[in-house]
Image: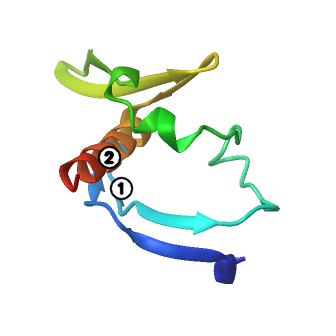
Amino acid sequence: MPGAVEIIGALPEWDIPTGFRVTPVVGWIEPPLELSLDSFEVAEVFEVPLAFFLDAANYERHSDEINGRKRNYYATPYEGRNIWGATAGMLHTLYRMLHSEG
């Protein structure tokens, strides 16, 4: 499947609370697509229109205190699902990058 992905670019690296550093990569895939999921890493796969993530009104700012440390994060609810934390933050970065080019 790697040959099915057209790499568009990368977003800035993210240091996430679990200690990993993640480099988000943006790519384009033409349907149909057959996925093979790692159930330890992925609970569910669903589609969200790109236009949804490109609307600033769909991002909420939240904060929690974990182990005595305040953490701020984004969340973006979509059709009963809650996309939050690093994933929502990466999507918000993509939104900001695309809007700054306009």
Disc 2 marks a residue whose amino acid type is Ile
| Residue to which mark 2 is pinned | 16
Q: What residue sits 35% from the left and 24% below the top?
A: 59
Q: What residue sits 22% from the left and 25% below the top?
A: 72
SS at circle 2: loop
Q: CA distance from mark 2 to mark 1?
A: 6 Å
Between residues 46 and 15, which one lies in front from this camera angle? 46
SS at circle 1: loop
Residue 68 located left or right of residue 62: left
Mark 1: give few (<14), some (14-19) or many (20+) Cα within 10 Å.
few
Q: Position of residue 11 (x, y in %)?
A: 31, 61
Q: Is residue 27 above or below residue 52?
A: below
Mark 2 and mark 1 residues within 8 Å of each other at the beta carbon: yes
Residue 29 located left or right of residue 26: right
Q: Is residue 1 above or below residue 15?
A: below
Q: Position of residue 32 (x, y in %)?
A: 82, 61
| Residue to which mark 1 is pinned | 20
Q: What residue sits 63% from the left and 19% below the top?
A: 79
Mark 2: give few (<14), some (14-19) or many (20+) Cα within 10 Å.
few
State the image quarter where residue 31 is shown.
bottom right
Residue 59 located left or right of residue 5: left
Disc 1 marks a residue whose amino acid type is Phe
Q: Position of residue 48 (x, y in %)?
A: 60, 37
Residue 75 located left or right of residue 39: left
Q: Quadrant of the N terminus?
A: bottom right
State the image quarter where residue 8 is shown.
bottom left
Outermost front residue = 102
Q: Is residue 32 above or below residue 54?
A: below
Between residues 65 and 44, which one lies in front from this camera angle? 44
Between residues 54 and 27, which one lies in front from this camera angle? 54
Q: Position of residue 36 (x, y in %)?
A: 78, 60
